Image (tube, coloured by chain):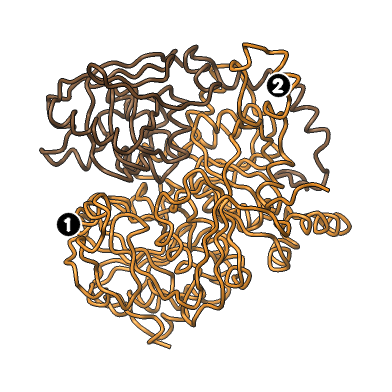
Amino acid sequence: MTEPRTLSEKIWDAHVVESPLADAARREALGAEADAGPQADLLYIDLHLVHEVTSPQAFEGLRLSGRTVRRPDLTLATVDHNVPTIGRDQPNPDPLSATQIQVMSDNCREFGLELYGIFDTRQGIVHVIGPEQGVTQPGLTIVCGDSHTSTHGAFGALAFGIGTSEVEHVLATQTLRQSRPLTMSVEVTGQLGPGVMAKDVILAIINEIGVDGGVGYVIEYRGEVIRGLSMEGRMTVCNMSIEGGARAGLIAPDETTFEYVKGRPRAPQGEDWEKAVEYWRTLPTDEGARFDREVVLDGAAIEPFVTWGTNPGQSVQIGDVVPDPSSFDEPSRREAATRALEYMDLEAGTPIREIAIDRVFLGSCTNARIDDLRAAASIVEGKQVASSVHAMVVPGSGLVKAQAEQEGLDAIFTAAGFEWRDAGCSMCLGMNPDILLPGERCASTSNRNFEGRQGPGGRTHLVSPPMAAAAAIAGRFVDVRELA
Amino acid sequence: MDPVSRVVGKAIPLNRANVDTDQIIPAKYLKRIERTGYGPFAFEAWRADPDFVLNNPAYEGAPILIAQQNLGSGSSREHAVWAIQGLGVEALIAPSFADIFKNNCFQGGVLTVELAQEDVDWLMARAEETPDAEIEVDLETQTVRAGPGWERSFEIDAFRKYRLLRGLDDIGMTLEYEADVERFEATRSPLLPSVTAD
C-alpha cells in the first residue's frame, strides 16, 4: 500500500524523469562529487505555452548554441502581451512592439512551432487559449514564461510560471530541474452568497494568507465553494495563486472539468476519451494525505472585495472603509499601507463606496472568459456608463470575442458606452497603448494593483467583473448585490 | 554564465517589502528583444523621487542590494534580473524571495542570500547609516561578513552552488540526461495532448 498522496504530488511523481535524491546508487557512485550533481528532480513538461515577451531571448539562446526545440508538438505559441486591441488592420504604430510580434512569428517558423498569430481567430491570452483548445488537461505539467500560468491548475494540472532562461531550457530539453514544493490546502467551506464571485474568493484567500503566504508552496483549493465554481471561476481562483506567492495552485478534476474539456479540438476523442477520464479520476488527493499547511475559510462570510492598496493582499469588502495604517500591528505592513494610501491618493476612513473612478477595465487572464463577460453584461444591460468614466472590454481570445458577439453581449456593452476591443493582455500590464494616465483611477478585473502596473501613476482597484460593471455605471464603487 | 564566487562592496538599503518586478523593470521596457540594456530603466518610477536610495551618489557602484521580505514578487519577467545586473548589482540580501524571481536570479548568476529578519534589519540600518560600509558575500563558504566579528551563514542548494561557482550551462548539464529523457518519453501515454496532431 502506497502512502496517501495529494493531487500535486501524484502529478509530480508521474513526471520525474530522474530523481537524484531517489537514486542512491548514482549518488554513491558520485561519492564526494555528489554535490556536483543535481539535488532537485528532473521533471518532464507536457505542455509549453510561449508568448512574444518572454521568449525572444530564449530563442536567441538556442540559435547561439546551435540547439533545436525538442518537442514542437508540445509547444504552443501566441501573441498577447504586446498586441494592439484596436486597428489591427493598420500598421502597428509602435515599432518595438511590431518587431517583437514579428520576431515571435519568425522564431515559430524557424523552429517549427504552432503559432496563433495576430490574425488567427484562436489568438488570445495564453491562459485563455490553452483551455479553450483543450490542450490544457488534468494531470499535465504545464509551464509558460508567465507567472499566471497557475491558471491551468483549475483543470487539475501542475502549472507554473518560469523565467526566460527556463523557457530556453524547456524548449531545448522539454524538462526542468525543480525542487519539490511544499503543499498547502486552502479549503473554502459552505456556500457563496449571491453576487459573490470567484474573484472575491481568491481576493479573500490572499487577504488571509498574505501576498507571500504561498511562497514555496503549491496550493490545492478545496471545499464546497470550490467544487461549486464553473471552470471559468476555478481559473480565476488558480490564476491569482501567484498573488499569494504560490507558483502553482490547483483544483481536483471532476465532472465540471470533464464537461468543459470534452469535445474541444485537442481533447481525446471516442474510446481515448473514456480512458483519459478513467485516469483523471485517479488524480484527486487521497483520503488521509497530509498537507504541509492547511487553511480554512468560511465561504458564506465572503463579500465582494475591492483592493485599496498597491498589492493584491491590501483589500477590504465593499461595505468597509479604507483602513488606517495604524491599525496594522506589524511595522512593515503599517509602512506599506502608508505608502500605498499616498500612492493611491486615499484617506484612511473613506468608505469604499465613496471612491469615484475614471476608468473600467474588463479583461485579463483572470477575468476575460465568456462567463466573466456574461456576468458583467447582465449588470450593464439597459444602463449607461457614467459620463465621467471611460470603460473598455477586452475579451480573452478571438473565440471568446466571437462567442460573446454571437450571444449579443458586444451590443449590450457598446450600447452602454463600453469600448469593445480585440483580444490581448491589454491594460492588465500596460505594455500596449491601453494604459491609465497618471492619477487615473481604475476599477479593474485584472490581477495586480502594483504601482504603475496599468500605466505610470495609474491607480488600480481589483474587483470582480460584476463589481467592475456596476462601478462603470455608477462612476464609483457600489455593492453589486444592491443592484439585483 | 560567468562564474560567481565572492561579492564584496557597498550595499544599497532598499527598505521595502514585497518589491515587485513591475517596480524593478516596468512592462513598457519588455518590448525589447535583447538581454542587456535594462539598467537605465530599473526602478524607473521610484527613481523619479530625488530622495530614492538609488539616487543617492553615496551608493554608486554598490554590488549588493538589501531589501525586505518577498523580494521580486509578481511577474515572472527575467528582465528584472537583467535590470538589476544592469545596475551593477551581483548579490541580493533579503529575509525571503519570491519563488520565480529567485530561480531567475540563479539563472542569471545573481546571488540571492536569505538571512533572518533581525540580521537583514541590522545590515539595512548599517548600510543606511554608513553607506561606505562594505559587505562580503562568500558563496564558497556560504557566509556573509560585515565588519569585524559579524558573520552569518546562508543556505543554498549544493548543486546550484556548484554550478554558480563554475558558471556551468544549465541546459548542457540537463542534456547529459538525454537517455533518461528518452526512456521517460517512451513511457508517456499516447492519450496525452499534442498541439499539432489532428
- Residue hosting label 2: B177
- Left or right: A54 in relation to A436: right
Type of residue at label 1? Glu
Q: Secondary structure at mark 2?
A: loop
- Left or right: B179 in relation to A324: right
Quadrant position of residue B57: top left
Query: Which of the two residues, A310 or A130, is positioned nearer the viewer here?
Result: A310
From mark 2 to mark 1, how far is it between C-alphas?
A: 53 Å
Residue drawn at x 23%, y 16% is B148
Q: Is residue A233 above or below residue A239?
A: below
Colour in which chain A is drawn: orange
Type of residue at label 2? Tyr
Residue drawn at x 40%, y 52% is A211
Q: Position of residue A184 (x, y in %)?
A: 56, 53
Q: Which mark is residue A342?
A: 1
Q: Position of residue B56 (x, y in %)?
A: 12, 30
Q: Chain of mark 2?
A: B
Q: How many marks?
A: 2
Q: Secondary structure at mark 1?
A: helix
Q: Chain of mark 1?
A: A
